[in-house]
Image (cartoon, grey):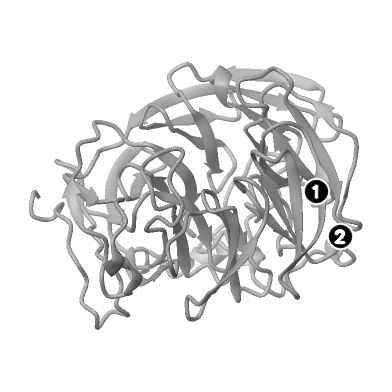
């Protein structure tokens, strides 16, 4: 087991990808690749979802309705734009993805964190959590015009999700360790769920049947499982840390795709989990960890950690490809919450069926890939460059990158429109 958990380097023959480790905690069998566990009739299997939730079209691939040709009729007249919330600028930069030019910028509330598509796809909400303040708000943006509306006062909206049945907006009140369920249109309070052992609650994903969600606890190195039907916390899981990780110190060699950053002993006693995404078959959750430099694999039903994949320095954002076969991992390049410019940031590509790294794309000259999403046609991965005041457009076939200067500390950008039937929130968690 100790050998399996040491940092390894994949040979240049595998697209010069950086190292990947897949391990299982003591006493737990290693995960079986999805390709080996798919029943022949899985696609036709019926998933018993919560009332009001749209049915699952394909039990093998819950991302099947977000492929490139599945744009909803409701979004056909929406502008093609990339909306970038600039955390320290208190504004949103708007990019035309066809010209790579900033075509607009508008003021929002204080400390905008994420731009979130609504469940019905008709509003983009800018979550302004007013860090260390009590003047949090949501700014609605009309995707047909790209223009903002009047701010709605909401307490501490660090992030925002929607219940799978569309009946509630879920405001992630990070500073209060609380989930506030509100009317998705008026934002009137419905009820709250306290999550007292989840310091830094921020990102989430939902089970295939909509009965529960798993939220990450950034400051406690754990995740929390929330019963959405009974409206209660089902349990917490402290994530295991690897023995080694990457060094986040600048290294000229990292400019080469064949040279990963140097490794170091992992002295962190707990992780710093960020984004989380469910596997296409709905069985496992992948949790990006900035301190561990990789993804924890968690069995959703049992809430047990069953594996780990090493990716790059400060694994942060997670985005499935349009065909549901790959997972793009944004590695932010620093273990610090406020990192330096030009760090060893990168993007890792993982094969969902094998849990293997199949490509590694360092940011030329260094950078800090954070949050974003995949374009509707699947050809581009758009990510904010958190510490570099940049946005990256990344070719998903080659890893080639374009850089676009935006405002101060860009965070959870979204590009619009995206394919899918409904949105579960964040920067475009559509199904």
Is 213 located above or below residue 115 in the figure?
A: above
**Is any atom of residue 228 visible in this view?**
yes
Tags 2 and 1 in contact by the CB under 8 Å rule? yes
Q: Secondary structure at mark 1?
A: loop
Give how far across and how far down residue 109 sits, in percent.
77, 33
**Is any atom of residue 36 visible in this view?**
no
How many numbered marks, from 0 up?
A: 2
Is 211 located above or below residue 154 in the figure?
A: below
Give how far across and how far down residue 79 sits, in percent.
85, 64
Give how far across and how far down residue 351 sits, in percent.
39, 69
Quadrant of the rendered structure where residue 305 is?
top left
Give how far across and how far down residue 423 sits, in percent.
70, 50
Q: Residues within 10 Å of mark 1 (few under 14, many from 20)?
A: some
Q: Residues within 10 Å of mark 2 (few under 14, many from 20)?
A: few
Q: Which residue is mark 1?
A: 120
Q: Secondary structure at mark 2?
A: helix
Instruction: Answer left or right for 409 relative to 146.
Output: left
Is 167 located above or below residue 254 in the figure?
A: above
What residue appears at the point 38 percent right and 37 percent down from the top-left corner? 272
The one of 423 and 7 positioned closer to us in this rendering: 7
What residue appears at the point 84 percent right and 50 percent down from the top-left corner? 122
Instruction: Answer left or right for 366 relative to 304.
Output: right
Instruction: Answer left or right for 202 relative to 14.
Output: right
What residue appears at the point 86 percent right and 55 percent down from the top-left corner? 146
Instruction: Answer left or right for 256 relative to 41.
Output: left
In the rendered structure, find residue 74 and report the number of the disc placed on it.
2
The one of 421 and 327 positioned closer to us in this rendering: 327
Mark 2 or mark 1: name the one nearer the start of the chain.
2
What residue appears at the point 43 percent right and 47 percent down from the top-left corner? 340
């Amino acid at each position: 087991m100790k050998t399996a958990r040491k940092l390894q380097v994949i040979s240049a023959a595998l697209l010069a990808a950086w190292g990947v480790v897949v391990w299982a905690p003591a006493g737990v069998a290693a995960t079986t690749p999805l390709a080996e566990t798919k029943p022949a009739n899985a696609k036709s299997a019926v998933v018993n979802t919560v009332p009001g939730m749209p049915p699952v079209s394909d039990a093998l691939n819950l991302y099947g309705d977000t492929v490139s040709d599945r744009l909803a009729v409701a979004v056909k007249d929406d502008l093609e734009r990339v909306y970038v919330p600039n955390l320290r600028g208190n504004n949103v930069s708007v990019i035309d993805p066809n010209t790579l030019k900033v075509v607009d910028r508008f003021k929002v509330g204080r400390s905008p964190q994420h731009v979130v598509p609504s469940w019905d796809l008709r509003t983009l909400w800018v979550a302004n959590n007013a860090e260390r303040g009590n003047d949090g708000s949501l700014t609605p943006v009309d995707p047909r015009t790209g223009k903002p509306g009047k701010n709605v006062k909401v307490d501490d909206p660090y992030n925002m999700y929607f219940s799978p049945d569309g009946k509630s907006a879920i405001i992630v009140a990070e500073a209060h360790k609380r989930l506030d369920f509100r009317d998705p249109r008026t934002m009137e309070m419905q009820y709250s769920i306290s999550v007292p052992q989840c310091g830094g609650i921020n990102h989430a994903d939902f089970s295939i049947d909509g009965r529960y969600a798993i939220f990450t606890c950034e400051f406690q190195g754990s995740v929390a499982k929330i019963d959405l039907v009974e409206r209660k916390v089902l349990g917490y899981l402290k994530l295991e840390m690897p023995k080694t990780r990457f060094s986040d110190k600048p290294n000229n060699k990292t400019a080469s795709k064949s040279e990963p950053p140097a490794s170091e002993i992992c002295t962190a006693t707990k992780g710093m989990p960020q984004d989380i995404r469910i596997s296409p078959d709905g069985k496992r959750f992948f949790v990006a960890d900035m301190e561990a430099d990789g993804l924890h694999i968690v069995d959703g039903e049992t809430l047990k950690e069953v594996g780990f994949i090493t990716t790059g320095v400060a694994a942060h954002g997670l985005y499935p490809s349009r065909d549901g076969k790959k997972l793009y991992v944004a590695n932010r390049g620093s273990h610090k919450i406020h990192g330096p410019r030009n760090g060893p940031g990168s993007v890792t590509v993982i094969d969902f069926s094998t849990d293997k790294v199949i490509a590694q794309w360092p940011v030329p000259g260094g950078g800090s890939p954070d949050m974003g999403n995949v374009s509707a046609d699947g050809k581009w991965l758009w990510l904010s460059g958190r510490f570099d005041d940049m946005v990256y457009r990344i070719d998903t076939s080659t890893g080639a990158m374009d850089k676009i200067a935006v405002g101060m500390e860009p965070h959870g950008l979204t590009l619009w429109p995206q394919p899918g039937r409904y949105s579960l929130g964040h920067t475009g968690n559509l199904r």
